[in-house]
């Protein structure tokens, strides 16, 4: 991880303890933030998610002020550039075994990476339909936790650099999301996005779009979606906090034109 | 993690890179070995599992000789004591994002911990019935990978130090395993153990018991088991590589006496 700057518990270091439960069990949560000129976009929503996700795992979340101090130090070192900031919170160290401590001392990591070169491309072009199916686990659904092997395996299904994303279904063939983005389908003037209470990650960009699309005349319905719904879709959009909203031009031999409302939706998502 | 001795890629250090995918995504596998007087029990089987589990995740496994060199150095530092050795293999560092490198440089960790005080207790006494249900994910089933949040949440369900294990079912209410052990039920002179091709971890102790029990007159059937099968069981056994075979004396208001074959099975499992 060259050109990455890392703070661990407020100190500049590229290392974490080999006894950290984040490493041993994936016992933690994370967020990925877009940084513009040294400023973290959507920070209040990101902190709220970090706090609610860590509460789901019974990991005490450091205060907003603690994170902000780490982020300021890390972004200062990054010379107020544009980039990506990953915040990770683990349950810290503990005795051997799965049992979580009743009084954990969590580890917080703040890691800055330079901006990916293609970050502002609004079209996803052609995307991949993943063979991997997401397991149903309501106890972890919606949470951006560190158990991400399903995403690693799904992302490993293609190596064509022209394909930027893959679409994943759950084990019961419901459409869920992109590998690293949330999914919206447009049909007949309504936006549909999958329920994420059985699997998937409920991202900040998704919440923002659900809140903002109605003002542009597009109500959002959160529901179960199937593969058949792709055939009927007027447009397929994927969103995350780093790249905002992107549209799918081609998948599985079918193609879609740029939808007239896309640009307004994309701008609405970025707007303060 | 006091009194733990750690080697990372052959070097004595208590730290790993904050950019390691084991930490970022739980992208790796591990084994837990029992150490007796500086010797790792069941090493050939443990290495075979490490190699096959890492192959499932497309992580190149270091050679047996590499692991043995690390283990010798670590156990030498541990002064040939009894204890527990954890071997962890991650996909190492990589660029930001889920995409695994086509040419990963894996990280190997070897961590020694002193023996738990109650390690040789053959009776589990009373065990807990976990509310958490394991998700079905054939792509990861059987593998001892680093995505262990389900086990952390299941183990967090009880804090009574007298309760050493919990029994977990899958989301379709099939019996699967203990939180950190494999399950065998005895009924009418036959041992039954759950299929682990949809979820669960297929441990070395389980393989050994499946191979050895028939010689004691107890054939083993690998099959689907339900909660109702607990009611009919003459005995419930749980096994892992650190504690060997243990028997359940009580669960959910029901109790079981020590089964006549238990001691012979336990000794057969430990025998070379």
Image (tube, coloured by chain):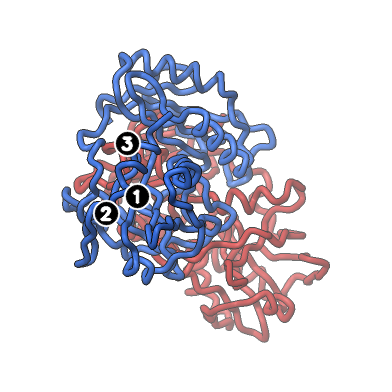
Chain colours: A red, B blue
Decide which of A75, A181 is in the foreground and name it. A181
Label 2, on which residue?
Answer: B248
Label 3, on which residue?
Answer: A9
Q: Is residue B164 left or right of residue A246?
A: left
**Nearest to N terminus: mark 1 or mark 2:** 1
In the image, what residue occupies the spot 71% across and 62% down? A129
Query: SS at mark 1?
Result: strand
Q: In this view, does A25 lie to the left or right of A271?
A: left
**Labelled pair 3, 2 in contact (Cβ < 8 Å):** no
Spatial distance from mark 3 to mark 2, Cα to Cα?
42 Å
| Residue A245 can be seen, yes or no | no
Chain of the residue where label 3 is placed in the rendered structure: A
Query: SS at mark 3?
Result: loop
**Labelled pair 1, 2 in contact (Cβ < 8 Å):** yes
Residue that protrudes farthest toward the front in the picture: B217
Label 1, on which residue?
Answer: B238
**Residue A125, horizontal then vertical, whole percent:** 76, 59
Badges 1 and 3, same chain: no
Q: Is residue A241 above or below residue A90?
A: below
């Amino acid at each position: 991880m060259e050109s990455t700057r890392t703070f661990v518990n407020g100190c500049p270091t590229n290392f974490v303890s080999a006894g950290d439960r984040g490493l041993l069990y994936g016992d933690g949560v994370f967020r990925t933030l877009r940084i513009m000129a040294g400023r973290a976009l959507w920070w209040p929503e990101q902190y709220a998610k970090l706090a609610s996700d860590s509460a789901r795992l019974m990991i005490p979340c450091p205060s907003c002020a603690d994170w902000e101090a780490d982020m300021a130090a890390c972004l200062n070192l990054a010379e107020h550039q544009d980039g990506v900031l990953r915040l990770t919170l683990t349950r810290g160290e503990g005795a051997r075994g799965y049992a979580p401590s009743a009084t954990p001392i969590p580890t917080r990591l703040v890691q800055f990476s330079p901006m990916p070169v293609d970050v502002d491309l609004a079209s996803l072009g052609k995307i991949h339909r993943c063979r991997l199916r997401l397991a149903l686990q309501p106890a972890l659904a919606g949470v951006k936790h560190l158990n991400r092997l399903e995403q690693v395996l799904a992302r490993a299904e293609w190596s064509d650099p022209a394909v930027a994303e893959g679409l994943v279904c759950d084990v019961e063939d419901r459409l869920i999301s992109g590998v690293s983005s949330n999914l919206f389908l447009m049909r007949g003037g309504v936006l549909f996005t999958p329920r994420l209470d059985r699997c998937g990650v409920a991202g900040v960009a998704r919440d923002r779009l659900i809140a903002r699309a109605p003002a542009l005349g597009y109500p959002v319905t959160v529901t179960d979606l199937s593969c058949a719904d792709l055939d009927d879709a007027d447009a397929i959009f994927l969103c995350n906090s780093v790249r905002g909203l992107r549209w799918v031009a081609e998948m599985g031999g079918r193609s879609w034109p740029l939808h007239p409302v896309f640009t307004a939706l994309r701008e609405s998502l970025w707007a303060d």
